[in-house]
Image: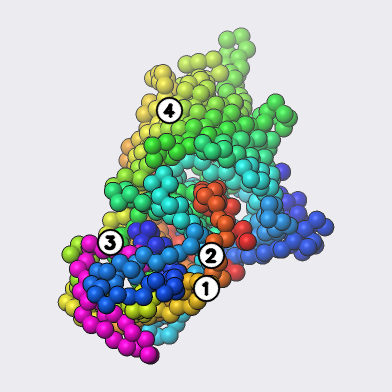
């Protein structure tokens, strides 16, 4: 049930073939976006790396005051993927590497039915659910897996993979309670093989859990307001979006004959807590998560199967403020491995900080924005300066740069990759400039 | 500060009782006049469309349309009023929602939430700089609200007759922080509606003018259009209220994060 051709046909059917009979008399609202995006790599092997054009349509039908059907779909074509040779798109490509030949598609993005009663909302269908407070931190915001086709640079609607699920929100007098039941099992999707942003891959033959009731993901979140503070507490019984790669070593008569990687997604429990408070004209946000039972790779031979289960603690704190008319957000994040041992390649503690500065000029027509991410491991950084100009009420143009740096590290599939992998620095020679023009209707 | 921004719109649609009991006494001071103009009856709740036309000196225009719901909560739990805005136009802002809980406690600040459809998330947001332009218009967030009476000294400097109607002319000079050197206001002697405001910069040069037109709505007189002209930049903004309904029975639950996410659901 991915963003498949079947989904595309469903999408087209809804728009072209007419709405289901029950919605024939409903008020239907159509909107959409025609967008062109181009990117040019400026560091090492300069090349046009993106020439994406897409048409996105959204239909909303309201058969009554208490129900609403929303369908969002997209048809896209990327001229760079089509016309630029793969070895130019990705200078790290080695002859013989697998290369994806996908450069166009029709996708169903989201499709859901909302049913609303006095104190209960139900949303059924393919959707994105966002939790958490600290933008981009993914501490508790882990309901939907991510699509890494363009690293971290896509907007939410493209970076998050929508899932078929049932979502129920109950609004009692004390706050809000949410229940998610997710039968569709999808996991992080790496960038396509051979693409510019290819970094990690899923081991061939990785076991995907069957779709059956016992394998569903279930999540619940409670929210309330106490002493002027917005609190949420959450529990997510999920599958790890990254597969654990269990190594099996074969030997005959004491002689090593081979090593097999058996990738497998494992169950994971995530307990979350968030708090948000307005103080001195600033918004203070705190977010924590406790991952119970995460499988981590170990050095070869350290453990049977070379995986070990550990609990992880993630937390972050952020401040949003307005300084002389400029929106400023500062955040600090930390991740810790409980019971870390020297044979676990990932560091016991990883720290990161972010800065977002945003200001508008010329009657809000020009928006300037700078996002900075800094990581303590390998002095990695990511900087995204951006200018957005509203050409008309319907058209907007954005130009910017994506600058990445720090230690390059080793590729995840290198022998040293487990200990020396650098998520951002790996792309330090991928600095690029980009432009987007969009027409909304 | 968004508080001021949306206050102001609340103030713009403020109704005025036309009963004879509000006929002005001849001994009013400048402060009395301003106080009466600021404490006009607004009904228990309101629903309306607020449209902003932003006009550049070269004549080019931009439009912003929002649906606005407002509820007088009477100070319950320290909240004086709640306002929610749903942006309907332009398309790139459609679905963006603001929720403002306006505190009735002068020691506390208002609370604001923002829903961005692109992020699929409601976020608590910080209050804005009072002197920042409201949505790119010619009024600041501070202009959109009502300064506390004691933040200025108000002097009745004269009376004028315009189009056959009598007006008090009040000059207000700030004693608390302000970007203006002074303000002049023409306030009706009959019903205390404000006809015109002139804003002067720190050098006491005229910065912008604001002209307000009113219509009758039942027993009330309500704001219909507000025309602001920055004479130094020649930029104009027209704020207009339409589809105004008063006392439509809005509930406290209509002003929540849930309402923000659900979007404008019509009548």
Which is more N-terminal, label 3 or label 2? 3
Residue lying farthest right? A21
Quarter of the image where one finds residue A345:
top left
Q: Residue at x 54, y 15 (%)?
A: A304
Which residue corresponds to mark 4? Answer: A313
Q: Nearer the viewer, mark 4 or mark 3?
A: 3
Which residue corresponds to mark 2? Answer: B246
Residue A281 seen in this snapshot: no
- On the rendered structure, is B182 left or right of B67? left
**Viewer-nearest residue: B148 or A92:** B148
Q: Residue at x 29, y 86 (%)?
A: B160
Q: Position of residue A47 (x, y in %)?
A: 48, 60
> What secondary structure is marked by label 1?
strand
Residue stretch in magenta? B143-170
Mark-to-mark CA distance, 4 and 3: 48 Å
Q: Are marks 1 and 2 in contact (CB under 8 Å)?
A: yes
Q: Are marks 4 and 3 in contact (CB under 8 Å)?
A: no
């Amino acid at each position: 049930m991915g963003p498949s051709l079947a989904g595309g046909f469903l999408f087209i059917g809804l728009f072209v073939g007419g709405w289901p009979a029950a919605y024939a008399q409903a008020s239907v609202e159509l909107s959409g976006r025609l967008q062109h995006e181009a990117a040019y790599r400026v560091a090492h092997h300069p090349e046009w790396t993106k020439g994406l054009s897409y048409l996105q349509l959204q239909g909303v039908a309201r058969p009554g005051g208490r129900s609403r059907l929303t369908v969002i779909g997209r048809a896209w074509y990327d001229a760079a993927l089509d016309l630029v040779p793969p070895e130019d798109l990705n200078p790290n490509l080695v002859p013989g590497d697998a290369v994806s030949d996908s450069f166009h598609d029709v996708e169903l993005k989201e499709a859901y039915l909302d049913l609303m009663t006095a104190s209960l909302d139900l949303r059924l269908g393919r959707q994105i659910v966002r939790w958490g407070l600290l933008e981009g931190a993914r501490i508790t915001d882990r309901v939907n897996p991510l699509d890494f086709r363009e690293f971290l640079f896509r907007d939410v609607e493209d970076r998050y993979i929508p899932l078929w699920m049932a979502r129920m929100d109950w609004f009692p007098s004390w706050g809000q309670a949410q229940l998610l039941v997710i039968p569709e099992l999808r996991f992080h999707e790496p960038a396509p093989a051979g693409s510019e942003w290819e970094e990690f891959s899923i081991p061939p033959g990785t076991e995907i859990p069957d779709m059956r009731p016992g394998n569903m993901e279930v999540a619940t979140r409670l929210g309330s307001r106490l002493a002027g503070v917005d609190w949420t507490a959450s529990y997510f019984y999920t599958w790890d979006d990254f597969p654990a790669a269990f190594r099996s070593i074969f030997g005959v008569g004491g002689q090593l004959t081979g090593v097999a990687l058996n990738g497998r997604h494992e169950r994971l429990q995530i307990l979350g807590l968030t708090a948000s408070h307005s103080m001195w004209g600033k918004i203070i946000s705190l977010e924590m998560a406790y991952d119970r039972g995460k499988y981590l790779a170990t050095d070869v031979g350290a453990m049977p199967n070379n995986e070990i289960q550990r609990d992880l603690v993630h937390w972050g704190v952020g401040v949003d403020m307005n300084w002389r008319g400029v929106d400023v957000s500062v955040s600090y994040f930390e991740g810790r491995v409980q019971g870390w041992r020297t044979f676990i390649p990932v560091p016991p503690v990883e720290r990161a900080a972010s800065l977002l500065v945003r200001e508008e000029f010329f009657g809000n027509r020009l928006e300037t924005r700078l996002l900075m991410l800094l990581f303590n491991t390998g002095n990695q950084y990511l900087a995204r300066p951006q200018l957005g100009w509203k050409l008309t009420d319907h058209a907007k143009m954005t130009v910017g740069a994506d600058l990445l740096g720090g230690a390059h590290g080793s590729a995840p599939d290198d022998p040293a990759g487990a200990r020396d992998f650098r998520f951002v620095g790996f792309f330090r020679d991928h600095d690029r400039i980009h432009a987007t023009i969009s027409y909304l209707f | 500060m968004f508080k001021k921004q949306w206050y102001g719109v609340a103030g713009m649609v403020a109704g005025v009782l036309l009963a004879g009991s509000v006929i002005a006494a001849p001994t009013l001071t400048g402060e009395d006049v301003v106080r009466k103009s600021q404490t006009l009856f607004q009904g228990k709740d309101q629903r309306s469309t607020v449209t902003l036309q932003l006009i550049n000196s070269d004549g080019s225009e931009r439009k912003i349309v929002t649906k606005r719901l407002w509820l007088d909560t009477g100070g319950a739990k320290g909240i004086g009023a709640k306002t929610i805005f749903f942006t309907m136009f332009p398309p790139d802002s459609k679905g963006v929602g603001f929720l403002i809980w306006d505190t009735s406690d002068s020691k506390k600040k208002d609370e604001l939430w923002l829903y961005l459809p692109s992020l699929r998330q409601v976020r608590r947001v910080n209050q804005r700089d009072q002197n920042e332009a409201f949505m790119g218009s010619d009024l600041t967030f501070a202009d959109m609200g009502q300064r506390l009476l004691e933040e200025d000294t108000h002097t009745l400097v004269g009376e004028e007759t315009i189009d056959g109607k009598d007006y008090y002319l009040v000059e207000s000079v700030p004693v608390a922080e302000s970007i203006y050197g002074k303000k002049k206001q023409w306030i009706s002697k009959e019903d205390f509606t404000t006809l015109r405001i002139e804003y002067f910069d720190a050098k006491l040069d005229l910065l912008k003018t604001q002209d307000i037109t009113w219509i009758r709505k039942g027993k009330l007189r309500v704001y219909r259009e507000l025309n602001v002209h920055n004479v130094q930049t020649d930029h104009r903004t027209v704020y207009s209220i339409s589809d105004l309904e008063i006392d439509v029975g809005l509930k406290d639950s209509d002003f929540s994060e849930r309402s923000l996410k659900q979007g404008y659901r019509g009548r």
